[in-house]
Amino acid sequence: MSLIQSSKNNYIKDLRKLARKKERLAQQRYLIEGIHLVKEVLKSNAKVQAVLATEAFEQSAWLDGVAVQWISGEVAKTLGETITTQGIFAVIELPELERPATLNGAWLLLDQIQDPGNIGTMVRTADAAGFNGVVLGQDSADLYSPKVVRSMQGSQFHITIYESDLLTWFADFKAAGIPVYGSELNEGAADFRTIKSQNDFALVMGNEGNGMQASLLEMTTKNLYIPIKGQAESLNVAVAAGILMFQLSATN
Amino acid sequence: MSLIQSSKNNYIKDLRKLARKKERLAQQRYLIEGIHLVKEVLKSNAKVQAVLATEAFEQSAWLDGVAVQWISGEVAKTLGETITTQGIFAVIELPELERPATLNGAWLLLDQIQDPGNIGTMVRTADAAGFNGVVLGQDSADLYSPKVVRSMQGSQFHITIYESDLLTWFADFKAAGIPVYGSELNEGAADFRTIKSQNDFALVMGNEGNGMQASLLEMTTKNLYIPIKGQAESLNVAVAAGILMFQLSATN
């Protein structure tokens, strides 16, 4: 394939626009960057529209059989998030998701989480903990922003992530007889260590500053609390999510 | 006190230099920013050299009795990490620490952690989990860099943090008969859930990419592993630290 040498190339200009949510929705695709993520997506079922790489990757055996669009180092710099870009990218179609046929397994629900790094880290942890999927409620930071994508480290290719109204999911879990555990910074809630590990459940984590919405806290099966022993006012939400996910999910 | 209106004021220029480690060591002080952190330090035993604030804080009752150096909004912008600074700062002396008289309680040891946000989050989690202190080994990111300070959220005023050679601490724990638990991404290590909670122990977390140094792994009492159930290759180190700290530390 030919080499794109100009950062003013229209295709490259379109890809650069994918840093913005509006453009990701309009173009129905997003960009990933770096060797690790490109390898992950090539192993996955995600729809890869293109792989772009600099000539530094011409001898990379792991790209054998992949139709690579070659780009110059200068073009790579304009696409990359940092000047020290590795020089390899892939363009991925936004997935079209149908509601799951069953709600079995473990689910992580995110209520108005704002920090992209927190969202990405929680998706990665849910993957590591063997969760079935993640549901991002409305008013969360966007799932396919460059920062979220970087901190997910490819876990979006392993587990399913929905962007949806949490209330609908609450109702579906209730109808299926599956417990929904809220989390709150409230000593009146249940100590998380009193909950036995289990196979089928949903865990809800709330906004960094304000926690879960009160209206959602009222609709859970039970709300959990991680006792704070020191003087810190709270835990980072991604750390709290990790502690709860590994406590709640069955160990086998 | 008079108002500093020029960002070229020599004192302000010295404070701006504190973003660099070399200058923090030379001046033996560091800068904190924001209402939350300034409130935390005023409640603590830390040595506060100065509080600087814009006129927006003139009516703040919580600053009654505090000798505030007033600064203009323009000066605040040059001191702040972001343009949207809250306009309040404090200058803190680097603490002079003596080795603790006893190693009782729980300790977190960090081996070559590179990401400032990870260090800060782990210090905050150690505080929340009721740990006695944290020891940063050599080749870690600097404890008083602006990013670490921001993510510690004031926990450095609640628990003691040492920057030291980990080998010396290992020897001291061993001499005191206190177990040191390493952590590694190795299914041959002990499943962390098999370790009972306890009062006196040290937990070691390793570098984001490479884990703990092999030489340290050999010197621990036992090395722990968090079983990964999904396809994620690993957990974020701060999440893993949170899971281990809350598993290991006694619940009472």
Image (cartoon, coloured by chain):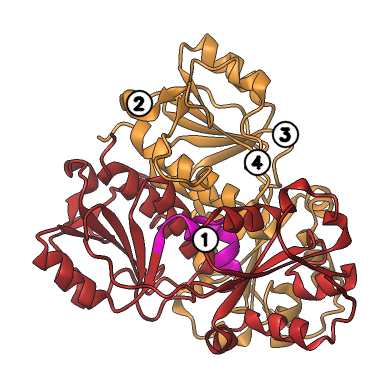
Chain colours: A red, B orange
Q: Which residue is denoted by mark 3 in the rendering?
A: B138
Q: Is residue A148 magenta?
A: yes
Indicate which disc residue B199 carries: 2
- Do the CB atoms of the residues marked 2 and 1 lie less than 8 Å apart? no
Q: Look at discs 1 and 4 and give the one toward the viewer.
A: 4
The crowd level at tag 2 (other Cα within 10 Å; few <14, some 14-19, many 20+) is some
Residue B128 placement (x, y as % from top left): 40, 47
Span colored in magenta: A147-160
> Which secondary structure lies at badge 2?
loop
Residue B210, quarter of the rendered image: top right
| Placement of the C terminus of chain B among the 4 image quadrants | top left
Q: Estimate the spatial distance between the alpha carbons at disc 2 and disc 1, rounded to whole Å.
A: 30 Å
Q: Is residue A213 above or below residue A32?
A: below
Q: Estimate the spatial distance between the alpha carbons at disc 4 and disc 2, rounded to whole Å.
A: 30 Å
> Which secondary structure lies at badge 1?
helix
Residue B122 placement (x, y as % from top left): 52, 46
Viewer-proximal residue among B233 and A44:
A44
Q: Estimate the spatial distance between the alpha carbons at disc 1 and disc 3, rounded to whole Å.
A: 30 Å
* Observer able to see residue B84: no
Q: Both on one chain, marks 2 and 1?
A: yes
- Do the CB atoms of the residues marked 1 and 3 lie less than 8 Å apart? no
The crowd level at tag 3 (other Cα within 10 Å; few <14, some 14-19, many 20+) is some
State which tag comes first along the sequence, 4 or 2: 2
The chain ID associated with circle 4 is B
- Do the CB atoms of the residues marked 1 and 4 lie less than 8 Å apart? no
